[in-house]
Amino acid sequence: VSIDSQHGALQLNQYKLLDNIGQGSYGIVKLVYNEEDETHYAMKILSKKKLMKKAGVFGRMIPGKKGSANPLAKVYREIALLKKLDHPNVVKLVEVLDDPDEDNLYLVFELVHRGEILQVPTDKPLDEETARKNFRDIVMGVEYLHYQRIVHRDIKPSNLLVDSDGRIKIADLGVSTELRACGELLSGSTGTPAFAAPETTMPGVHYSGTLCDVWSMGVTLYCLVTGRIPWDGTGSIIGVQAAIRNEPLKFPEKPVISKDLRDLISRMLNKNPLERITLSEIKEHIWLTN
Ligand SMILES: COc1ccc(C(=O)/C=C\Nc2cc(OC)c(C(=O)O)cc2Cl)cc1
């Protein structure tokens, strides 16, 4: 992996590094141009040191906590997962550049041309017709992941990318978990607090990862059609978790949400995971089928 500046743009092997197109707790995503196949890609740049530090604080071998000593194992597990996935509604990993002596790790993905589906909050939410088209793709993508025994655990608008043909691809399996046995229960909280199911906020409670993904899809669908998150608990994580656990779901006056859509969102945001609508029931719901 040699980086030499050429006409001012950084070069990484056959990739010319261009603009920053994504930013998050994970690191950054750059638009890159592959000179060999004359194609643009999205390159996610991860710092191993940063991953070690992050894992170092939380990843310390807590007695009895499963998981490997090497915090990078998580990233390599994500990469192994991504390499085996192949679905029109999941981002496609095409190459990994990993120089053992280098701090950075480069994940090269097929470019999903129009980027994130929606910035939240926004005063220009999607109309129901567009939201329905997009949500159908999201359901297919999540169903595929669950079929592969993977729970995403961080479904939210910024991880949903729109391709040039308007189709949605799910991104960021960074905090996903591969279930050893299907139906395996999980514990601990990961992902983004405002999108996390109430049962994930109770310490020591074991919960179904697939039902949590349904909850996050519900919060996401609410965001797509209202432009806001349903519970924001004055910004603090504890505040948002308390609001999610205790406050009833409310829809804003504007924009007007149809009865069928309000019904679907309410069933996905049922605080009791055992009563919550499942993915297969979502596929039969009148808002998605009519
Ligand atoms: C305006 O045009 C734009 C076109 C593409 C983008 C874009 O791609 C952004 C993020 N991308 C990604 C993020 C990921 O994680 C967080 C992962 C992953 O780890 O799975 C993969 C990808 Cl691709 C942005 C703007």
Image (spheres, rainbow, N blue to C red):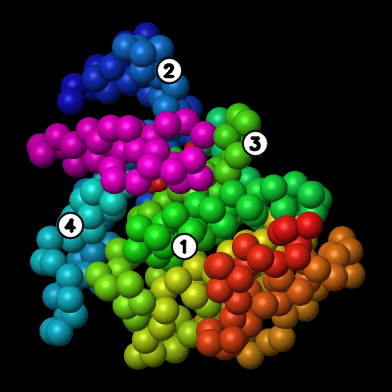
| Residue under label 4 | 73
Q: Whole-Å distance between the Cαs marked 4 and 2?
A: 30 Å
Asked whether 281 falls inside the magenta stretch, the response is no
> Which circle, 1 or 3, is nearer the viewer?
3
- The picture places residue 259, in percent across and down from the top left corner, at 85, 70
Task: State the separation of the CA atoms marked 4 and 3.
Answer: 34 Å
The local secondary structure at tag 1 comes to loop
How far separated are the C-alphas under marks 3 and 2? 20 Å
Check disc 3: other Cα within 10 Å, few if <14, some if 14-19, many if 20+.
Answer: some
Label 1 vs label 3: CA separation?
Answer: 22 Å
For label 1, the residue is: 154
Q: Secondary structure under badge 4?
A: helix
Question: Which of the pair 150/22 is nearer the observer?
Answer: 150
> What's the magenta region?
83-112
Looking at numbered disc 3 in the image, what kind of residue is underneath it? Gly
Spot occupied by residue 198 in the image (x, y as percentages of width and height): 53, 83
Q: Could you tell me which residue is drawn at 18 percent across and 25 percent down?
A: 1
Circle 4: residue type: Ala
Residue drawn at x 34%, y 63% is 149
Q: Residues within 10 Å of mark 4 (few under 14, many from 20)?
A: few
Please state which of residues 141 and 254 is positioned toward the viewer in this rendering. Answer: 141
Residue 23: x %, y % from top left: 47, 45
Q: 56 left or right of 39?
A: left
User: Does label 3 or label 2 sit earlier along the sequence?
Assistant: 2
Q: Which residue is mark 3?
A: 166
Residue 49 shows up from this direction = no
